[in-house]
Every structure is written in C-alpha cells, then in structure tokens.
Image (cartoon, rainbow, N blue to C red):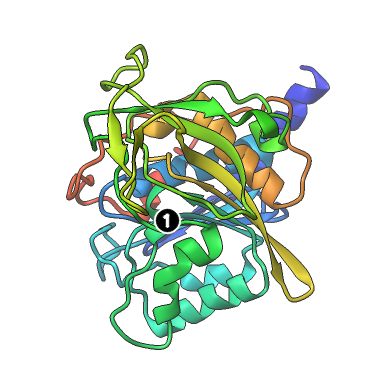
Amino acid sequence: MTLRSLLLACLLFASLRAADAGPGWVSFGPSSGRKVVLLAGDEEYRSEESLPMLARLLAERHGFRCTVLFSHDPDGTLNPNRAESLGNPVAIDEAELLVLGLRFRRWPDATMARFDAAMTRGVPVVALRTSTHAFQFKEGPYLKYNSFGPQVLGEGWRTHWGHHAVEATRSVVEPANAAHPILRGVGTIFADTDVYEAYPPADATVLLRGHVLVGMKPTDSESTKVKKRQTDGVEQPVNSPAMPVAWVRELPRGAAIQRVFCTTMASASDLADASLRRLVVNGVFWGLGLEVPAKADVEPLTPYQPSRYAFNGFRKGQKAEQFLPAAR
C-alpha cells in the first residue's frame, strides 16, 4: 500500500467513525476538519438529496467536518415543504463555511438569529440555485433577509431566462476570469435546469455564463431565440450576451472579508455532472481561503441517482440517519 493510499484509508476510517445523525441533521468527517454546514431546504430542486452527497464527498475525500441540516416534520421525517423548520440550528454557531440549498424559508427568530450572526461575522457562503431567493418573511425582525439574494449573493429571483424544464444549460467560461482558482479542473458543465435571468453587481467576478439550449440533451444546439429583459423590456438574443450562472463576491464585514460564491445551477440532477460538483467543491476551498486542488476528487461515495426536480417530488418517509455510511 502506498503512503497516499494509507493516508486516504485512514481518512476514510476516521470519517466513518465520526458520522452521526439526529432529528433533521447528519454529520460526516473527522472532528478536526474545517467545519462546513450545509443547509437543505427547497421544495423543488432536491437539496435534501444533493447536500448529503456533497457533505460526504467533502468529508471523506477532502477531510472537512460536514453537517447537513434539513427541513423536517416533528418526528424527524425530512419534509422540504416545511419552510419554518431546520434541524439542529445550533450547528450554525460553529460553521466556518455555509453551503446553501434554500428557497423561501421562514425559520423561527432563534434560528435566524444564528444565521444572522454568521453573516455578521463574515462566514463564507457557497449558494446554490434558488438560494438567490432563500427567505420569504411576511413580518418580524428578519424581513431584511427577503433581500438576502441581491444584498449578499449579488442577485435575487427575477425569472427563468430559459424555458423551465424544456431548455437546458451549457456553461461557458468568462474569458477575463478563466484563471480564477474556482475554475481549476472544471470543464464544460451540462445542467438540466434552465438559465436564470441574472445581473450580478459590478463588484462581482463572473466565472461562468450559461448558454440556453434548444432542448434537454447535452448534445442539443444553442438557442437563437430572442427575449425581453425583465429589467428594461429590451429584447436581446438569449445567448448574446449570455446570463451569468456562477460568480464570486468579497464583502466587507467589519474587520473581516466575507467570501461568497453563487451559482444558479446545482439542482440535485445538475450535480450528476462531475464538473459542476468540482465547481462547488472548489468554491468551498476558495471560500475557506484554502489552496484549490488542480483537479479535486469529486466522485460520490455511493452511487448518486438524484430525483428529477419537481414540487412535492421528494422521497417520502426519509430520515437523516438514512444518509449515514453503511457499517463495514
């Protein structure tokens, strides 16, 4: 056995020993690893499937301590439709980075206080797909988080730029930023979700744009249709200029700088694409200020067979402990 193989075996053994779960949460990885907390809570794009996969990958391939928090019923059954629920929110207090798979959450004030404290102290954020519209409060002290997308990530919800569930996405690198470390080892991404209309602010660094395809296959050609922009009603070709689908920001938080990576891709089905998984994993390394690998290992620990995105399409009856590694 080579030294590298021995080290990986030891890391895997430590990760398996450290796995744990409770009502609405599951953790993986060595307790000594950098603490990454993944927040799963969207009704359509199956973050309750993708984030446990990413958490195990980050833990067992790369040595992070990862905890996934889910929306759930009182008995611990996972239920992404329960927008007011989040398992074990105390884990946010120790987060060194947050990965968000959220949509229109309405967490209790005590949970939001923990999230707000994390934002205030500049915890880095990796935000996926509908996290641009992560919260939807009607009243209370955290109404400001209805603007979390534009204020923190750099964009909120506008509209589907591609035809939802009809026109898929192919990524294109922004030439001026092709050397950004988050793009290391990342090839062309195929996402079976559509492009969102998005206009990150001037302080954002756009990494990828998304070309709208005419259909739902990786081999489909690019659309030549035109569409009116929501911002000003002006008509333009959907792919000229193409909408940004991945970007970064660095925000001042007192004496700290908060690193933010956002992609409007990354449904569970999108993450079947290895280059998209690598993009997200690289975003974690970059957010934590770590050296991004030349080509990060992004192979899931178990066969990854994500559900198709759909409202109420979640797998019924699941609990967090079902994601624990099988005994060996």
Residue at 42 percent of width and 56 percent of height: 131
The residue depicted at 32 percent of the width and 35 percent of the height is 194
The quadrant of the picture occupied by the N terminus is top right
Can residue 299 be seen from the camera position used here? no
User: Which quadrant holds residue 70?
Assistant: bottom left
Q: Quadrant of residue 240?
A: top left
**Furthest-bottom residue in view?**
140
Count the marks: how many? Answer: 1
Label 1: element kind: helix
Can you name the residue that lies furthest to the right here? Answer: 3
Query: Vertical placement of 316 versus 176: above or below?
Result: below
Q: Is residue 180 left or right of residue 39?
A: right
- Please provide percent x and percent y for residue 223: 32, 22
View extreme (top): residue: 219
Q: Is residue 92 above or below residue 165?
A: below
Along the line of sight, the residue nearer the viewer: 262 or 229: 229
Q: Residue at x 60, y 26 (%)?
A: 186
Residue 46 vs residue 21: left or right? left
The 10 Å Cα crowd at callout 1, few under 14, some 14 to 19, many 20 or more, is many
Q: Is residue 75 left or right of residue 87?
A: left
List x then y, in percent, for residue 221. Answer: 34, 14
On the image, the x and y values in percent for residue 317 come to 21, 51
Instruction: Using the rendered image of the protein, determine whether residue 279 is visible from the camera's viewpoint.
Output: yes
Measured from the top left, where is residue 308 in percent x and y?
Answer: 25, 34
**Callout 1, which amino acid?**
Ser
Residue position marked by numbered label 1 in the rendering = 131
Residue at horizontal 27%, vertical 21%? 214
* 18 shown above or below 4: below
